[in-house]
Amino acid sequence: MRKSKFFKFTIKGDDLNPMDIKEKVHLPCKVFIKNETTLAGIIKKPIIQKTNRWLYSSMDQGEMRVNHFLVSQLEILAKNVLPLKEFTTRYHALIELVVYEDRNISHYNLVLSKRAQYLLNKIGVRFSITIVDFF
């Protein structure tokens, strides 16, 4: 397995209409409706959606540096920050960065650039980083 990076931006809530976000924010996205059954994960396990959700996601399996990948995705969101604010201030919003490493490493050092920090502050939602080492 090669090194992979996943970026996800989720907005969710029971009274959220994810189609409203889709119409106002022109980004490739997935829309999930509460109580719908969808297929999740690699094995496509059926799950029932617990709430309404709008999801923007991106993946990189190349050698792009983690910070560069993160900044490139945050730049995309920052261009849409005004229409997104309508939803991020009223509903649960989260940016997730997941990094998979398959190298034999005993440590991983990730430093967020000033640009990444600036963009995260501009977007103004919770941010989570997960690093998975397949040793």
Image: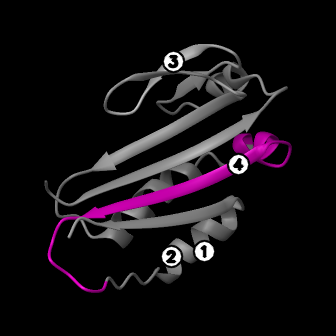
Residue ID for mark 2: 115
Q: Position of residue 81 (x, y in %)?
A: 67, 50
What amino acid does circle 3 point to? Thr
What amino acid does circle 2 point to? Arg
Q: Quadrant of the N terminus?
A: bottom left
What amino acid does circle 4 point to? Ala
Cα–Cα span, label 1 and label 3: 35 Å
Residue ID for mark 4: 93
Q: Earlier in the sequence, mark 2 or mark 3?
A: 3
Q: Residues within 10 Å of mark 1 (few under 14, many from 20)?
A: some
Q: Earlier in the sequence, mark 1 or mark 4?
A: 4
Q: Secondary structure at mark 4?
A: strand
Question: Residue at 31% of width from left, 32% of height from top?
Answer: 42
Q: Position of residue 9 (x, y in %)?
A: 56, 46
Q: Earlier in the sequence, mark 1 or mark 3?
A: 3
Residue ID for mark 1: 118
Q: Quadrant of residue 69?
A: bottom left
Cα–Cα span, label 2 and label 3: 36 Å
Q: In the visual, does 63 lie left or right of 12?
A: left
Q: Position of residue 16 (x, y in %)?
A: 79, 28
The magenta-colored residue range is 83-107
Question: Residue at 73% of width from left, 28% of height from top?
Answer: 51
Question: Is residue 31 visible to us here?
Answer: yes
Question: Residue at 61% of width from left, 42% of height from top?
Answer: 10
Q: Which mark is residue 38?
A: 3
Q: Secondary structure at mark 2?
A: helix
> Does 107 sit above or below residue 44?
below
Q: Are marks 1 and 2 in contact (CB under 8 Å)?
A: yes
